[in-house]
Image (tube, rainbow, N blue to C red):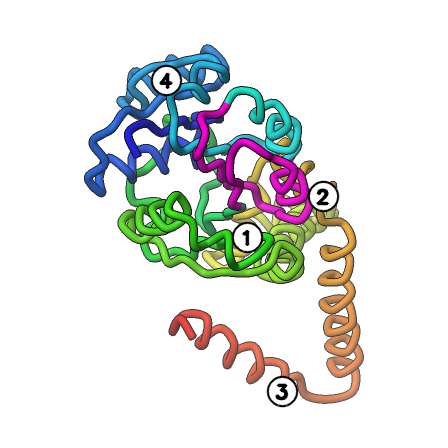
Amino acid sequence: MQTVAIVGAGLIGGSFALALRRAGFSGGIVGVSSPPAIETALRLGVIDRGVTLAEACAAAELIYLAGPIHKIINVIPQLDSLVKPGALVTDAGSTKSRICAAGALLKNAQFLGGHPMAGKESRGAASAEATLFQGRPYLLTPNTLAELETPAAREFVEWVTAIGAEPRVLSPELHDRVVAHSSHLPQLLSTTLAATLGAHPDSYAIAAAAGPGLLDSTRLAMSSWEIWNDIVDTNRAEIAGALADYEERLRTLRLTLETGSVEETFRAGDEFARRLRDGE
């Protein structure tokens, strides 16, 4: 792999580029993005040069799609007439079923879906970090397991490991069901909590009396709707299912609170929280 093209030189794409450099990649890294984003990425040394999509595809053995989900879905069909034979196209989108379905139609390049489980509330190349993926799961979502056995895919997985991430393989459908619970549900709970408290008649008093627990619980509420609009739109059914699971648990908790002890819920929550932090 001599050249990598980052399509969407923002937080995730920029962090992947910086992580590659940190891991020892000595080839060229080009960026495809808006002029302001390219200017920032160049100034910070995230990419070597900004290019058009056609120029990127002509040069790169790896094309890394790191924009919003709908942009990824829309750009994939454009790649077939532009890519080098044998190139690998991958992405960093937060939902996978629709992206991988689009990728499966590529004829002149291989597509391998991906989703690094890392991020920040802030966006753009200015927020990119070479260590963003370290110790974090990097979900790979091939349409078939054989797709992981090509030379290009094997090399990509080696680089994923080299940047400190932990490759894990899921089908696109299982991915969307799992992240609806592990990522999308926490986001919506944080957002709803902040919106509920913000609408409360005593919202200013609540904010003035807040401790670190409320700050931690509302951190995700600062996430960008521009990003989450695409996520919700492409994973509605699984997110609705995750919300229904939580809603049922919350209803049971409210009824228990009215008539008895909620100790069992505390114990169950403590058990999972500790398992989560132990990496099990």
Residue 214 falls inside the magenta stretch: no
Amino acid type of the residue tagged 2 in the rendering: Thr
List x then y, in percent, for residue 211.
48, 56
Task: Tell me if 134 is positioned left or right of 35 in this view.
Answer: left
State the residue at coordinates (45%, 34%).
64
For the residues labelled 1 and 2, say whether their Cβ atoms are less than 8 Å apart.
no
- Return the residue at label 1: 142
For the residues labelled 1 and 3, say whether their Cβ atoms are less than 8 Å apart.
no
For the residues labelled 4 and 1, say whether their Cβ atoms are less than 8 Å apart.
no
- Return the residue at label 3: 264
Mark sitting on residue 40: 4
For the residues labelled 2 and 3, say whether their Cβ atoms are less than 8 Å apart.
no
Task: Tell me if 159 is positioned left or right of 65 in this view.
Answer: left
Distance of label 4 from label 2 (alpha carbons)? 30 Å
- Return the residue at label 2: 234
Please provide the residue range marked out in magenta: 83-112
User: Within 10 angstroms of label 2, few (less than 14), some, or many (20 or more) residues?
Assistant: many
